[in-house]
Amino acid sequence: MTEIAVGAAPLSRERVGFSLNRVGVIAANTLTEAVRQKVFNFFLIIGLVFIGSASFFAQFTFGEQMKFIKDTCLGVISVISTLIAIVGTAQLLPNEVENRTIYTILAKPVRRFEFLLGKFLGSLFLLGVSILAMSLLFGAVLFIKEQGMIRELHEQYGQNLPAAEVADMNQQIQEVTRSAFDVDLVKALLAETAKATLVAAITLLISTFSTSLVFNVIVPFMIFVAGMLRGAAAEVWGGHKLLMALLAVVPDFGLFSIADEINLGNPVPWGHIGEVIAYGLVRTLIIVIAAHLIFSRREI
Amino acid sequence: MDAIRTEQLTKKYDLGWRKGRLLALDKLNLRVHEGEVYGLLGPNGSGKSTTLKLILDLIAPTEGQAWVFDVPCRKVTSRLHVGFLPENPYFYRYLTGVETLEFYGKLCGMGGAPLRRRIEELLELVGLVKARDRRLSGYSKGMLQRIGLAQALIHDPKLLLLDEPTAGVDPIGSKDIRDLILRLKGMGKTVLLSSHLLAQVQNVCDRIGVLNLGQLILEGDVRTLISDQRRLSITVQDLPEAARTRVEEAVRAAGATVVGVENPQTTLESLFLDALNKDQRGTGHHD
Amino acid sequence: MGMKLLVVILLFGTGLGLLPMENSVRNERLRLKYGGARVTFELREAIGQNLAIALLAGLRGVVADFLWIQSHGFWEKKEWLRQYRDMEVVVTLQPQSILFWDLGSWHMAWNIGYAALTDPQNRTRAEGIKREREWHEKARDFLARGIQNVPNHYDLYFYMGWLYYEKLNNDCDEPPCRDALCRAAEYFRKAASFPDAPQYVARMYPRALEKCGDLVAAYAEWKRLWFQDHTKVEQLWSVIEREIKQLENRLNIPNDQRVFPRGTS
């Protein structure tokens, strides 16, 4: 064995401030864990669903087919991103405590908030990568379907068309293209991302005081369901001020439901999307602060 | 300066509603001098792990305080100079040996070429050069212990806290770890060692403290504590049987008592290591 | 315990504090007419438990599509009333969908209506015609509700015009039929007034005016179309030219007042 080199560590001995670098190290490690544990295998299943949804509906009109594809794909993205947010985040802290890896990390000059934020950001990176990958698959499916429909139109109309039919065909091609690629779909994906981020934050909060993985999955899911029902509850019991005040602790997840409106061609102003995302981010920030308050005093 | 100092350090755990509290540590006053190897002994539930957790701020004291190099343990800065090897260390199994040390090094603010150099040095030190690029899921228990030591040393801390460092490790590995601890001591580092394996503690520690039911019931220099001042042992070699009788008579004539006459024994560990050393085929130690 | 209590207070307090923001977003959704019928007991009975759960999970579009595909299956099996019921539920779920209102009315007027006309269980032809007529009127009422829900797009006005033009006119010269064609013209005019309406929509207005009997108005409209900027508007100019020429002959427009005087190519 060789001698240990002396004076290898260039640490400041004066103070240890909050370090984004340390947060980044923990976040990157969290993402590495998710990738190397083959979390992404399920994307293959998602891909099959997406591609399958493009093939099943050939007996319907172009407009119907496009609507089915967009509704199905965005619905899958919504469900899967919520599942990733819950399941991916629920195990972060319990696994660290159960495996005792948290001891060696917190034994280093690492603040508890850095650790918590790093794990959370790692989970968000996973979520972001997942949503991006699903979105790219979604875009590819739309493109393939659009090209297929255009090819069909050309075959239907044939060659050497009179001017009237050329105009008609071009009109239909334009409608196919317009229904396939709508820039507003990006707004739907942004809203879904904001929603999933908020769900992940809630899961993080629950996991700061609960050690049971099952509890950490079920409770955030129930909160999500309650949040989806808030709109309906407000319609039915809006007059009961006390009940509405109590329900206010649960985020209104119904506000993030933009995808359907975009698929129907309804206008979704950027101002509205901005307000929805801001709402999600404010809720997320508050919940992360709450998680920090609990975790900072938790006995490991 | 003391490496570790505690004053009236007390920890009570809540057992739940109407079940009262468990006194895990009772007004512990402990001083670990800089540069010594201190053994913290005690049965299960005596408060050893609680003491280590309090020093590392993993739990909060109910009463009292603790300092590391005069920095209160509740401050993050106290851990700048501390390296910790937990009992049965479990690291991220999907990381390789190098990646594990990189991760911990970066947490300590290290990076670039200095970190890479440090990693190479430590892998060489703990004998894991050949396994550097293997994922930890493929490491044996001894290898995990060694990578654990390496991560504890990554930032060249002045104080090492080792919780059962030789638990579950074979005799060769245990000897290596003991030799390493002595080497660290030679470099001026302070080691607080918690262990059940009393024979190993005896060979390594300068001072020991014995905890029982949260209280320090015995503390002192190892050699002084274990030696029996009243008895003297003289070892001779090739003494004829006739001369043995005259020696015994001389002892009795001096007014002392012959307590026992027997051949000295080596330790089972030494016998084991000698046998392996003599075996030309080597140990097949996993690396 | 103290910290947990503080966290609970923080969450409730900020929840209350965010109510104005939530209400603002909610009100904007109402203004933009997002969503559809809320999940009532009746709706849950109509769509079943599983779809009700999917609805509550925010998968309104997927649920509507599922029911639409189901209704298509009923169409193939000729189960018209089941198809009709599903289509009614679908537009309740997504009243902003032009596609569902359009295709729903098409099914009623063209498919179900024809099936009612040719149903072997009809005792007389008159009974068949009456039943077909009932489905035409159902389609009209259905589309009228669609227009109330989606008043800012050309599509449903055009489809309503087409419904009057093709189905509600009974192919006759008597006043009720002409009334229908004049109503068709009105709807085509309304549809063509939207800037994103395709040019064929614009051409249907004067066509319907002609069938309605108002040749003068039809001629005026064809001329208006003709005098658009040919370099900026994509139109079937040859068709418009032909229509103008025909009307100029039928209306005996003096040569010097014609768009296409006789003797010119």
Image (cartoon, coloured by chain):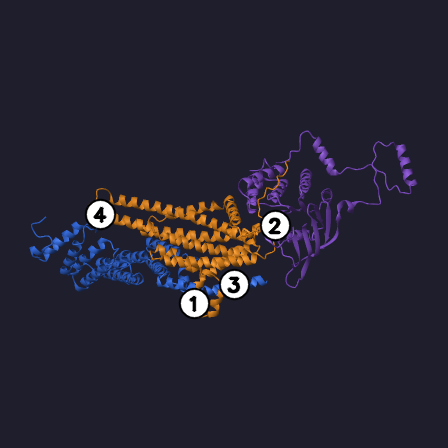
Chain colours: A orange, B purple, C blue
- The residue marked by circle 2 belongs to what chain? B
Residue ID for mark 4: A165
Task: Report which residue position mark 1 lands on.
Answer: A236
Give the CA separation, mark 3 to mark 2: 32 Å
* Farthest right residue in view: B253
Q: What element carries label 4?
A: helix
Whether labels 1 and 2 belong to a single chain: the reply is no
To which residue does mark 3 refer? Answer: C10
Mark closer to the observer (3, 4): 3
Report the Cα–Cα distance between label 1 and label 2: 56 Å
Residue C54 on image: x %, y %: 43, 57
**Tag 2 residue:** B79
Instruction: Decide: few, some or many residues near mark 4? Use Cα within 10 Å; few <14, some 14-19, many ≥20.
Output: few
Q: Distance between the residues labelled 2 and 4?
A: 79 Å
Across and down, in percent, residue A141 comes to: 37, 46
Left of A81 or right of it: where is A151? left
Q: Which residue is drawn at 45% across and 51% down?
A: A80
